[in-house]
Image (cartoon, rainbow, N blue to C red):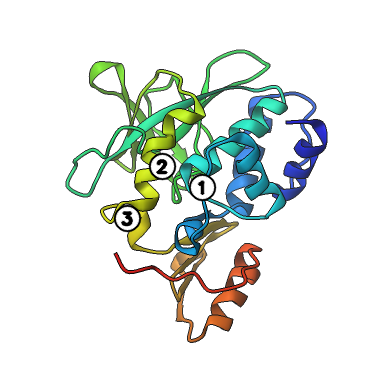
């Protein structure tokens, strides 16, 4: 990733190039990413390929002004951080289901990040949807208040770590570093299997300064401070495409539609 592409990525998220790869710079990059790059699975329903290579991810997020799901967002953000002098490990996680069961291996990707200042590592995650606004202290086992809730990283069996949000387990994290290609098989499953929730529904969601904006199919939900919530059902393809442009900066030539399973 050359300097020109790094600068383009920084413009994409509205961030300045940090002078030092510091913890403060990581916090700023993390929150700017969440505010500007949506969590979305539109490619699955537009018949577009998802290639887990660094050039493909950067082309999608930076050049095409799109978002993606965890592998795409985490992989692209890792490339940006490395280009700015941060140390980054890709970590695999298994997401907890509603009944407490764990998803498949490589179900999710998060990042372990080290800074030029030294000290402890940080857990960065810009690809989970509703999660922490700022990186979490990877080495702490205490509660960590965040605008997204109260988080805690706890020891789990076999040397893994559980990430909890408001007391509920979110995902189980392996500590062994992985390569981007290690996630390819589960990525393929997530975008092709009828059992995958990404295959079953449409979502495009982005954090806002005081809440969140989400477009699920034709349902647009905007939340704000003090419990404000506006929900609207869009009635035409033109309205849907306009909402993607207005709220997410995504310009599509047709409305994504969930194909029959």
| Residue 115 shows up from this direction | yes
In terms of depth relative to the viewer, which is nearer, 225 or 87? 87
Q: What number is the disc on residue 109?
A: none
Label 2 secondary element: helix
Q: Which residue is mark 3?
A: 197
What residue would you read off at disc 1? 50
Element on which disc 3 rests? helix
Q: Position of residue 92 (x, y in %)?
A: 39, 29
Q: Residue furthest bottom?
A: 235
Answer with mark 2 or mark 1, whichever residue precedes in sequence.
1
Q: Position of residue 160 (x, y in %)?
A: 31, 21
Residue labelled with disc 2: 187
**Residue 229 visible in the picture:** no
For the C terminus, give its image quadrant.
bottom left
Q: Is residue 112 left or right of residue 156?
A: right
Residues marked 2 and 1 touching at CB (< 8 Å)? yes
User: How far is mark 2 from mark 1, CA to CA?
Assistant: 8 Å
Q: Earlier in the sequence, mark 2 or mark 3?
A: 2
| Residue at the image point whose x is 32% and y is 55% from the top | 197
- Please determine whether, in this image, residue 92 is positioned above or below residue 211: above
């Amino acid at each position: 990733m050359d300097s020109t592409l790094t600068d383009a990525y920084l413009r994409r998220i509205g961030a300045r190039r940090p002078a030092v790869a510091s913890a403060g710079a990581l916090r700023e990059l993390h929150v700017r990413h969440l505010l500007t790059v949506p969590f979305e699975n539109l490619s699955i329903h537009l018949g577009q390929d998802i290639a887990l290579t660094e050039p493909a991810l950067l082309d999608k997020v930076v050049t095409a002004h799109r978002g993606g799901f965890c592998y795409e967002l985490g992989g692209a953000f890792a490339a940006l951080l490395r280009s700015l002098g941060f140390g980054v490990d890709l970590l695999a996680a298994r997401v907890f289901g509603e009944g407490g069961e764990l998803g498949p291996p490589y179900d999710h990707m998060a990042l372990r990040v080290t800074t030029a200042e030294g000290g402890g590592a940080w857990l960065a995650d810009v690809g989970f949807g509703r999660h922490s606004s700022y990186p979490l202290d990877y080495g702490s086992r205490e509660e960590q208040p965040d605008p997204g809730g109260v988080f805690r990283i706890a020891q789990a069996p076999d040397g893994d770590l559980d990430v909890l949000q408001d007391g509920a387990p979110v995902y189980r994290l392996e500590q062994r570093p992985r390569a981007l290609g290690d996630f390819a098989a589960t990525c393929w499953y997530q975008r092709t299997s009828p059992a995958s929730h990404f295959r079953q529904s449409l979502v495009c969601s982005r954090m806002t300064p005081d809440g969140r904006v989400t477009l699920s199919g034709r349902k647009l939900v905007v939340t704000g401070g003090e419990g404000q919530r506006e929900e609207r059902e869009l009635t035409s393809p033109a309205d849907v495409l306009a909402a993607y442009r207005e709220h997410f900066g995504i310009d599509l030539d047709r409305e994504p539609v969930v194909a029959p399973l």
